[in-house]
Amino acid sequence: MLFPIVLAGGSGSRLWPLSRQLHPKQFLPLLGKSSMLQATIVRLKGLETAPPTIICNNEHRFLAAEQLRAAGVNDAKVLLEPVGRNTAPAIALAALALVKGNPNAVLLVLAADHVIDDEAAFRAAVENAARYAAQGKLVTFGIKPDMAHTGYGYIRAGKTLGPGACELDEFVEKPSKETAQSYLTEGNYTWNSGMFLFRADRYLEELKQWRPDILEACTQAMANPVPDLTFIRINEEAFRACPSESVDYAVMEKTGAGVVIEMDAGWSDIGSWSALWEKLDKDANGNACNGDVMLHNASNSLVRADHRLVALVGVENLIVVETKDAIMVAHKDHVEDVKVLVASIESDRRHEHINHREVYRPWGMFDSIDNGHRYQVKRITVNPGAKLSVQKHHHRAEHWIVVSGTAMVTNGEKQYLVTENQSTYIPIGEIHSLENPGVIPLELIEVQSGSYLGEDDIVRLQDQYGRA
């Protein structure tokens, strides 16, 4: 039996403005209706696996939990990282969590943001790798290259061990175009997929040999894990002290027990907008469009319009992405520089790199429709049976107008129902809460007014989601 470990951290800044810090690419439906996390879980069907362990950032916990619930996965463990420390520590946390009860547990380490077209080939490669992992080998999956790609790291294969399996000879950094072409010609190089298969005890043994500092920090962090609803929390102070390192550098480049299994399964890490364009269906002129798009004499472009008409005339090789609060236009040859743009947004102390206008919460979501001096307007959706925290604000008052559904309002000592086309007022400093007692989503307009309207002006007194 395999124990899937799904690494769902990362911000996906190269896919801005669609991917944001609080809603990164692994939680987005980039290809089809399912998010990339959901597709990763569904891909496991057909393999003999235990319930998956999802490792994600604390800020993404409710988003991950909701997407797992929507995918029908109710037995997953969600292990929360208080801070990101790269893949070697993340895998160590999972290995430590599993090794006590399952010392020979075989970990199938997957990224939550990969695309695999041929799932049967993926499963066949995993089954091939499991034989070597059972022998104590540390297996990585090398993707059979179909072009001289300069955006991926490479793996050089050594002695052949069996069909599709070789000794792991060397990891190679992202090459120049000429070097990548030579790798393709030689034929013994594969792309580094970032997927792994090994026994938990063997990984910890290797980590102890090569990076005992990482193992020690992770051991301390996992000494007394704390259950929180459906999540598992670790010691934040201990984990913050852990060095940040990839599993490639920490273990796989140093071990003498490495094996590379070749996988030819239509893999991509969707690491840029041009990589996504390559995976999308296109029209006769090479355009991949989503949303309300009009084209005239345009070719080889990706156009995504989420909320309004986007029209292109007489252009080619463009990436155009429209969201409610940002529009990004880039040449396909320069999409790697999107991360530079995101860094500039952050340095200018803007917020468009953090979240969308639509912000998801464990109870539903809100859309910041408008804001100005001393006021802000939000459209709020509360899921059936959900409840916002019991809270108060020091600097703002709120008006709530119900658009559809029924709201149960706690306003100081009073509790009452507010239905469609009715409204209520919450004064500054008043303890209040909002609940949807119905079976349909509750939609309301919230008008905030006051001297300060930031999200940090929320004093939570009680919260069923553990945020108080």
Image: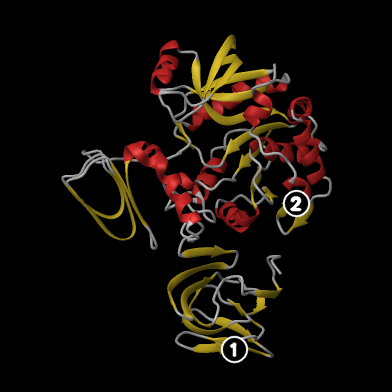
Q: Amino acid at mark 1?
A: Pro
Query: What SS does tag 1 mark?
Result: loop
Of the 4 image quadrants, the one containing the N terminus is: top right
Circle 1 packing at 10 Å, graded few (<14), some (14-19), many (20+), is some
Nearer to me, 143 or 343:
343
x and y, in percent, of residue 69 in the image: 59, 55
Nearer to me, 218 or 79:
218
Residue 1 in sight:
no
Vertical comparison of 16 with 437: above or below: above
x and y, in percent, of residue 430 in the image: 65, 86
**Are discs 1 and 2 less than 8 Å apart at CB?**
no
**Residue under pointer 2:** 236
x and y, in percent, of residue 446 in the image: 49, 79
Nearer to me, 54 or 406:
54
Question: For residue 99, what is the image quadrant?
Answer: top right
State which tag comes first along the sequence, 1 or 2. 2
Q: Residue at x 71, y 69 (%)?
A: 468
